[in-house]
Every structure is written in C-alpha cells, then in structure tokens.
Amino acid sequence: MRLLIDDARVWDGTGAAPFPGKVLIDGERIAAVVPQSQALAADGAERVDARGKFLMPGMVEGHSHLSFVDVARGTALGELPPEDHTLLAMDAARKLLAAGFTSACSAAAAKIRIDVAIRDAIEDGLIDGPRLLAAGPELTVTGGLGDGRKLHLPLESFGVPVDGPDEMLRMVRLCLREGVDTIKLNISGDFSTDSAPADAAVMTDGEISVAVEATHVIGRRVAAHARASDSVKRAVRHGVDVIYHCDFADDEALDLLEAAKNRVFTGPAFGIVLARMEGLRGDNSRHGRVVFDRLQRLYEASCRTHNAMRKRGIRIVLGGDYGFAANPQGTNARDLEHFVGHFGFTPSEALQAATRTGGEIMQRGHELGLVKSGYLADLLLVDGDPIADVRVMQDNRRFAFVMKGGVRYLPCQGAPHLRRLH
C-alpha cells in the first residue's frame, strides 16, 4: 500500500523546526520526505490531506509496565490469575498504542511470561499494541522493592526475591530461557519500602555481577531500579544497560553516567512520584505524612538530578511507572509535561526523548524514532502544536491517526482504544 500524507507540518524528531512537507509511505516504511514545494511522484498512492496538521514520529514508552494493570497495591498483581492478568495486559497494550506510543521498552512484567506472550502476539498480528521489548519480573532481595511477603503471609507481588549470586543466577537463566529481552534488577529500595529505603543500595555487587554476565553472554540487556547513589554506581560499573530513576545520584555517580552516556540509557519514571504526592495531599495520618515526606525528598532530588543529567547530555527516555491506580495506563503522555515543567526540557527536547532517544532504547535507532526515508512508518498526525504546548499530546482525540508500520489507527469516539483502518 502506498499513502501520500500531503500538506503536513513535518517535525522529523531531530530537533529541527517543523516544516511544510509531504511524506510518502510505501508498505511499512517511509519512502520519501520532501518540502511541500517539491514535486513528489506518488502514482497510485492514496492521498491524505493533512491540512497543516503536525506530523511526527510515534512515541516510545521507555519504562513500560503493561502488566501493571492500574492496581492500588503491588500485591494485587500477585493475586491475579495468569489468564485474567494476560487479558488485562493486552488491554493495556491497546491503550498505550491509542495514547500515541508505537513502541515500548518494558521495565518489568508482573509475571515471568506476560510480556513475552504480549510481545509475540503483537508481532504475530493477533492483537494491536506497540512494538515491545519484553522484560521479566523485578528481581529483588528479601525485604526489597517488590517483595510482598510477610512472615505469616506468603503474598506475591511484582518482584521475585533472590538472595546471593546462586539464587540470582538461577532466576536470571530461567527468565532468559522463557524469552525475555531484558532482565530487571532492583538494586535500590524505594519510598514505599520500609526495609529497603530509596537511598539504600540493597543488592550486592556479587548478585549484580552474575546477573549481568549471564544476560550479556547471550546478547540480551539488563535494566536496573536504582534510586540510591551507590546503586547507580554499582549499575554503571557492572555494565547495566538501562538505569532507571538515579534520583540521589551524587557528582561521582553523574560523572560515571556521563562517561558511559553512549552506552547507557536512563529514565526518571517520574509520573508515579507526582501522582502519589498529589494523592497524599491532605492525608494527615501518620503513614500518609511519612510517605509524603519521603516523596517530597525524592521529588527534589529527582528534579535536581535530571536537570543536571540533561545538561551533561546523558540519554533520558520517557516513562513514568504508569499502571498504578494513581497514574493509569494510557495517560503516559503526561511525561512530556513533566519533563518540561520539572526537568528544564524544552518541548522539542521532551519530544526528542519520546521519539529519537526512544528509537535508540528500542535498539532500532537506525529505523525508529525519526520521520526519515527508509525508516519504519510509525507516525502520529496531530491536530495541534506540541512544540507550543506539549499538553496536546495527552488528548488522543487530537490524533487524526496513529500509524504503526504503515497501518493507520483512528480514534474511536468515547473509547480508550483505536480502530484499525484496513
């Protein structure tokens, strides 16, 4: 199929200013991108009159949790039967595509094979959703983030506790055997975990080392939850590929990240922090005050760190831990506003984080993330100007279409999903 998108304002993802132009799609790829004034042979192509709408690359969710299905607590994910859970994750994939995200790099699944099953179903055309790099569950330590167990109550959550190099190696190899693209390690704790605070590095060098070695030897990647400064340093030194959060990174940690900036990716996953803070305002219970104070400190550190990382040229991707009740699936484009409002990004820089840098974290920077001849036709046609106001991206009713691999999806009136245009 050939399609000519005519008279669009083309923003190509490089950071250059939008220009009046036309784009020819041939099958799943972009065949040509030219200024509007230039002639373009498009014999037999269907013509779409963009009427000056904003044409840009499809966005990439760099910290995806498709199996986090808008629950209020992590142990609710462990309580879901795998059949129900997979169907809900499939629905989350459809919502993410409808929100303008044509690719997603998973930062963890709540069960070992859910991401794998969703990834394969999308690739086989059985369900609609973004291109997906699948992750396994969050490998944590006893008492760490994602360990939902109590001494008297063996609850499951989104993490799998492993202690010591031997347990770590066995679980990493099991996840790799089951087909995950990414192994996730919770090197630090978090604001919600009393026994593993956000500024504590609770996973040992030995545990991290065996996980990275076993994963890299077969050519796959390791991602880390790393809020504490020491956790960032351990992640960089052991060769972790994607280092999320980094909130409390000190100058030494930032120097390590900058030295490795052509190898590593980072992502603040900031949406959950803001959403939880907002939800706790006015909560005067002891627990509410304690958690809010932790979040306030985390918020201030994250703003400081990510402003510094932006200035140092460290690659930062969009993604805000969407999939909890406070920040549900499909609202992921809020991150653009967060990057501008809290981290000092310009709208263009925030959009580049969502597109060009997103293509790179998908390991497909040669064919994803830009409006460029030869690239995959993953595109958004937007009725509005996100360079002037990134908040327009939060309303998918502003999308004339979402395109993935040359296939157009149109908004459904009053529904959170899209309709495929055959």
Image (cartoon, rainbow, N blue to C red):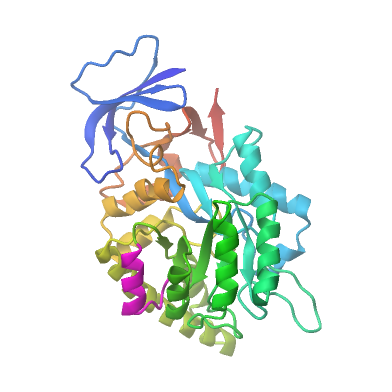
Residue 137 at x, y = what percent? 64, 61
* Residue displayed at 75% across by 81% down: 150
Q: Residue furthest right?
A: 152
Instruction: Answer left or right for 403 relative to 106.
Output: left
Residue 75 at x, y = what percent? 70, 69
Q: Residue furthest top?
A: 43
Q: Which residues are magenta?
A: 246-260
* Residue displayed at 42% across by 41% down: 58
* Residue displayed at 70% across by 74% down: 148
Residue 222 at x, y = what percent? 53, 60
Above or below residue 145? Residue 183 is above
As rendered, which of 400 and 283 lies closer to the eye? 400
Quadrant of the image occupied by residue 264? bottom left
Quadrant of the image occupied by residue 420? top right
Quarter the C terminus occupies: top right
Q: Is residue 210 magenta?
A: no
